[in-house]
Image (cartoon, rainbow, N blue to C red):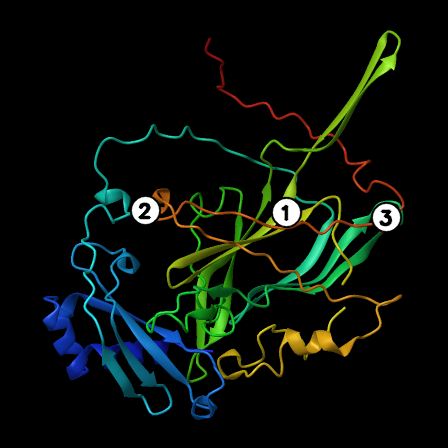
Amino acid sequence: MLTFEEQITAENLTVTYAPFVASVSKRGLKIAKVACGSFTVGWYGKKERSGRRIVKVMCYYLDGTVNLCMRPIEGMMVTVDLEEMNVVDFFDRIIVPVPDGKRMDYRWSEQRAPFAPQVKGITVVRPNGWANWAFHLSFDMQVGPIISSAQIYDIDKDEYRSAMYKGFISELLVPYMDLTKEWYYRTFFDAGEYGFGLCAVQLEQERDCPANAMFMDGYFSGLDGSPGIIKNVFCVFERYVGDIMWRHTEGGILEKVVREVRPDVSLVVRLVSTVDNYDYIIDWEFKQAGSIKATYNKSEQYVGGVYVDQSQGDDTLAQWSLRNREIENKDIVLWYTLGFHHVPCQEDFPIIPTLSSGFELRPTNFFEQNPVLKVKPPKQVIWPNCSVVD
């Protein structure tokens, strides 16, 4: 996994490397306005790559915008050996025009009229707290949030029952699928190579999380072993967006209508990790209706291998799944793969609206009956100073 210190050093080497500076000048750009990023290169079977930690440094041009990924300096590349901390390769094969910075800034302070109508304010308050889940939440430098010992209360048995031993995002694979010399290696493992937890950001109340959220800090160790902290890295809150958990209207009884409805309220654990040009918003959502029961092997946690950047495929999920282990009457480790296929469009400019997806793990024959059948209807909250205008 790359550390911030290594990446910053590699990027500083690049902007002071004489051939690179000359290539920037040849394009009519100012070196003081250049910002760079370090990218892992993967393993493609070459023996000379084995055991070496190297990165390719790609650079961008600011000069009028902070949206740096929209202004790449294409056609040239610097390769840095992280162990020796020196430049081991450089090429400048073609000059590609850098896009201008017009209309690329996404900051509110830089926007100009006309503006969209302002969204009306909304407040959600759950004064009575959460009821039927218990779990342990921890922070990890590589994978971010780890949920462990998750238990759900079974009202019929009057006890908490284990639903999940341990759950986390093992890896996030980002393959760009571009065969050009500057792009072919860009098949990134954002957790194993960059640290999904290390790239997590501080969350803001009523921006990243609702007003009823509680916050937790995350702790990690630096390159020299010294402790570090990310303030408010988690927020935990109850979510209700007007969905129905269950309902039924019985209209077949003469002179009588029976109606029962329960709102769908869930408990959410949220973390946001910004890995280069991606802001990942990760929600673990615990519903009152329950979750799964899954096993654990501490040697098989990271789908891309323990040391992803150095892996040659011999300690990955591809190998573990070849063991043909018995599954009858066994607890199962679930490796769920969730895929996004991003087809760029004009509406992505200059910054893409949030693209959402997810999956739900539902209990099957875990409870004796519907586990939310006996959830009490919520108490009505009387809001003062509210009126309806015709």
How much space separates mark 1 and mark 2, taking CA atoms? 33 Å
Residue drawn at 32 percent across, 30 percent down: 116
How much space separates mark 3 and mark 2, taking CA atoms? 48 Å
Question: Which of disc 2 and disc 1 is earlier in sequence?
Answer: 1
Residue drawn at 49 percent across, 13 percent down: 388
According to the picture, the residue beneath numbered tag 2 turns out to be 349
At mark 3, the secondary structure is loop
Q: Which of the pair 147/158 is nearer the observer?
A: 147
Q: Which mark is residue 267?
A: 1
- The relative height of residue 290 versus residue 62 in the rendered view (above or below) is above
Q: Amino acid at mark 3?
A: Phe
Q: Which of the pair 330/320 is nearer the observer?
A: 320
* Disc 3 residue crowd, few under 14, some 14–19, many 20+, Cα 10 Å: some
Q: Which of the pair 164/81 is nearer the observer?
A: 81
How much space separates mark 1 and mark 3, taking CA atoms? 20 Å
Residue drawn at 66 percent across, 60 percent down: 336
According to the picture, the residue beneath numbered tag 3 turns out to be 367
Question: Which of disc 2 and disc 3 is earlier in sequence?
Answer: 2
Residue 206 at what x, y percent from top left?
44, 43
- The relative height of residue 80 versus residue 279 in the rendered view (above or below) is below
* Disc 1 residue crowd, few under 14, some 14–19, many 20+, Cα 10 Å: some
Q: Is residue 79 left or right of residue 327?
A: left
Q: Amino acid at mark 1?
A: Leu
